[in-house]
Image (cartoon, rainbow, N blue to C red):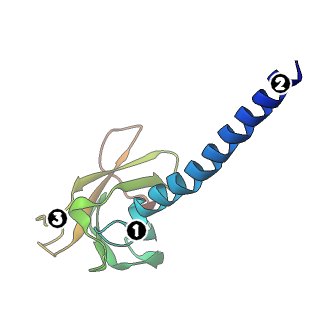
Amino acid sequence: MLRRSVSAAFALTFAGLITAAISPAHAEFQAAHTPATASHGSVAAAIINADGSLNNATNVRKSWRASTGRYCVQLDSSVDAPYSLIQLTPRDERRLPHIAYRNPSATCWWHHNTVAVNVYDTNTGRLANGGFDFLAL
């Protein structure tokens, strides 16, 4: 009986050591492959007002409203627009922003490294002015 208890305790201790050794290695692997540290570039974030101006931004050169409901966000050269994962969040519950073009587009006058965003009114389904939060990883 004592022999089984000692064997079980030894097995549990050994399993705990293996788990402890694997966990940091897994964490290092995950940290090395996060989007922020990937070779594609940095993270860009901005709050875009309904008039197209920047409210607050990181790694965003400029933004503007091209026409009603059509916006352009030009990213810093450290962020690669065509390969970025982009998330848009409306600042008004009746507006729905979506990515129209990543780079370059006639909407944004063929500027390099820009993202064209269209914003629609959810009630009418037509283009409408509306601010949004922009995140590019």
Q: Secondary structure at mark 2?
A: helix
Q: Nearer the viewer, residue 88 or 2?
A: 2
Q: CA distance from mark 3 to mark 1?
A: 22 Å
* Residue at the spot 16% in from the left edge and 75% down from the top edge: 112
Residue type at the position of mark 1: Thr
User: Which numbered disc, 2 or 1, marks the residue that appears first in the sequence?
Assistant: 2
Residue that carries the numbered disc 2 in the rendered image: 3
* Residue at the spot 36% in from the left edge and 38% down from the top edge: 124
Circle 2 crowding by C-alpha within 10 Å: few under 14, some 14–19, many from 20: few
Q: Is residue 39 visible?
A: yes
Residue that carries the numbered disc 1 in the rendered image: 37
Circle 3 crowding by C-alpha within 10 Å: few under 14, some 14–19, many from 20: some
Residue type at the position of mark 3: Asn
Relative to 23, residue 13 above or below: above
111 vs 79, left or right, is left
Q: CA distance from mark 2 to mark 1?
A: 50 Å
As drawn, the residue found furthest toward the front would be 3
Q: Quadrant of residue 48?
A: bottom left
Quadrant holding the C terminus:
bottom left
Q: Nearer the viewer, residue 58 or 48?
A: 58
* Residue at the spot 83% in from the left edge and 24% down from the top edge: 3
Q: Secondary structure at mark 3?
A: loop
Residue that carries the numbered disc 3 in the rendered image: 103
Total number of numbered discs in the rendering:
3
Q: CA distance from mark 2 to mark 3?
A: 69 Å
User: Which numbered disc, 2 or 3, marks the residue that appears first in the sequence?
Assistant: 2
**Residue 73: x, y in percent?**
31, 70
